[in-house]
Amino acid sequence: EVQLVESGGDMVQPGGSLRLSCAASGFTFRNYALSWVRQVPGKGLEWVSTISGSDATTYYTDSVKGRFTISRDNSKNTLYLQMNSLRAEDTAIYYCAKPRLSTTRVDSFDIWGQGTMVTVSS
Amino acid sequence: DIVMTQSPDSLAVSLGERATINCKSSQSVLSSSNNKNYLAWYQQKPGQPPKLLIYWASTRESGVPDRFSGSGSGTDFTLTISSLQAEDVAVYYCHQYYSTPQSFGQGTKLEIK
């Protein structure tokens, strides 16, 4: 069974840091680009970041550039999101998501994790 | 950046009736190289992650009931549920993956009338 399991969400003060993890199973992890998508509870979805499978090229939405770093460890089948200089507006459920096809990062997301909650508050 | 706008924001439909949700993109998401629309639809129920329903604007994901269909091209798209079932109560999102940053519509909440 293809599965993504996020962890690492917590409550943190503004300006703090957090590292999210996404453990993958059931597919050839190194072949797939993977993404983080976030959602303020009760609100819409926002794409955050993508890392390609082939050369680990990274992509970010403007609001997190310079603060968040996406990375992957293909030996551990795990995706990461290092979040620094956190702001109240980063408060959300963070999902990792897998594209349908292994050949491209430009694709719809067929598998999502259950999400991990990040709360930034003093 | 491409902005996705859904209409309506909420919709109430009787069981067995048709539900129609619209999505408009601020720029075309149709690729001239492969003639594909980079547009997907998702269903999200409370406490769950989104579930992929439709990709390439009109291709149904495996296991999705055939009462769900997608149509449209360029900048205007529609998700249709031909005969609403109780289990279809959810929020529906469109998603463009044509360009970075990818973007989603604001969501349409579908309820039973």
Image: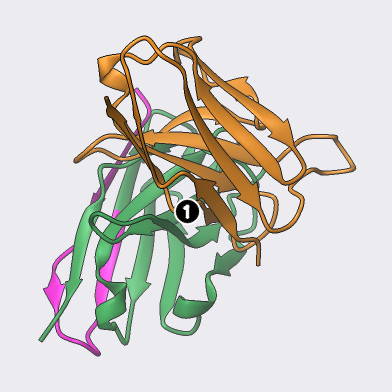
Chain colours: A green, B orange
The magenta span reads: A1-21
* Residue A10 part of the magenta-drawn span: yes
Q: Which residue is mark 1?
A: A35
Q: Amino acid at mark 1?
A: Ser
Q: Dividing the picture into quarters, in which one does residue A113 lie? A: top left
Q: Residue at x 14, y 81 (%)?
A: A121
| Left-right relation of B93 to A93 | right
Camera-nearest residue between B21 and A113? B21
Spot occupied by residue A65 in the image (x, y as percentages of width and height): 50, 80
Spot occupied by residue B72 in the image (x, y as percentages of width and height): 70, 32
User: Which subunit holds the residue at mark 1?
Assistant: A
In the rendered image, the quadrant that contains the C terminus of chain B is top left
* Residue B80 part of the magenta-drawn span: no
| Left-right relation of A22 to B60 | left
Q: Dividing the picture into quarters, in which one does residue A67 lie? A: bottom left
Could you classify mark 1 by the number of other residues whose Cα lies within 10 Å: few (under 14), some (14-19), or many (20 or more)?
Answer: many
Spot occupied by residue B71 in the image (x, y as percentages of width and height): 66, 27
Return the residue found at the far bottom: A15
In the rendered image, the quadrant that contains the N terminus of chain B is bottom right
Q: Residue at x 37, y 65 (%)?
A: A81
Q: Is residue B16 above or below residue B71?
A: above
Element under disc 1: strand
